[in-house]
Image: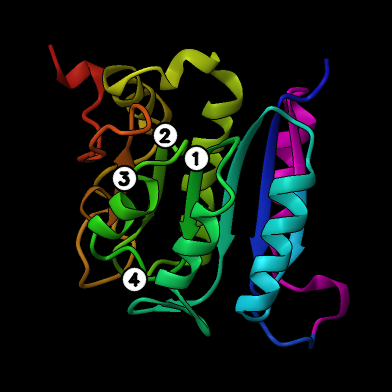
Amino acid sequence: MTAEIALLILENPWDEPRKGTRRLSVQPFFEGLERIHDNLAVYHSTFHDLNGLRSALDYDLRLTKEPRQVLYVGSHGSGRMLNNVRFADLRTAIQERTDRLEGVIISSCEVCKDPQDLVKLVKDTSIRWAIGYQCPVGWFDSMVLELALLNAVAETDVDYKKNMEALEQFFRKALQILNRDHVLEPGHGRLADSVSIVINSRVGAQPRVLDWPVKETELT
């Protein structure tokens, strides 16, 4: 099977170069998904500043051949900064390159504290969903959530993003494996209250902030 989804990983270094080849990265974990799903191709780049981020976006978003794209941006974060890159600058850089982009993961502490920042990211673009964190989050905890989400993207028919109802149903199924009451960081509440999710049905529509989905068994 030819891959139809490009998973584009852009990482700001998580740690100093003291461990040789054992530097922390989501790459080997996401490549595990690539081994499971023939329709998924993983591409990895590293950025150190805004110019490097733009170059990586140009190289990956514009040169990959798969018809569908999902973007992961990972970095230490605080406030509205991904290390030394402002979220507003990241948003602009992504919005200039969204022809085939359907989903965005911002894996960075606190940067998506205000879900409206993600609304601004996806509005009037091809992006159908975006997700990020409102509080400090452990590296492993965030990766587990992201793996569950990306696994669902690879398993689900492309029609999952055809409208708001389909997107809401997709997130309900994708995240039901996770414990909504898990505490990402002591003093910051439950997982369900600490993740920003925004969905967008089409260009020109008004994006919507999605509450953490209720499990299907709880709807009856």
Q: Which residue is mark 4?
A: 110
> Is 23 above or below relative to 83?
above
Q: Which residue is mark 1?
A: 103
Q: Are circles 2 and 3 on residues that touch, CB within 8 Å?
A: no
- Residue 50 location (% of width, % of height): 60, 77
Q: CA distance from mark 4 to mark 2?
A: 22 Å
The residue located at (44%, 18%) in the rendering is: 160
- Residue 14 location (% of width, % of height): 63, 76
Discs 2/3, front: 2
What amino acid type is highlighted by mark number 2? Answer: Arg
Judge the density around disc 1: few (<14), some (14-19), many (≥20) Cα neighbours within 10 Å: many
Q: Which residue is mark 2?
A: 128
Q: Earlier in the sequence, mark 2 or mark 3?
A: 2
Q: Earlier in the sequence, mark 4 or mark 1?
A: 1
Q: Can see residue 14?
A: no
What amino acid type is highlighted by mark number 4? Answer: Glu
- Residue 58 location (% of width, % of height): 71, 57
Residue range highlighted in magenta: 19-42
Q: CA distance from mark 4 to mark 1?
A: 19 Å
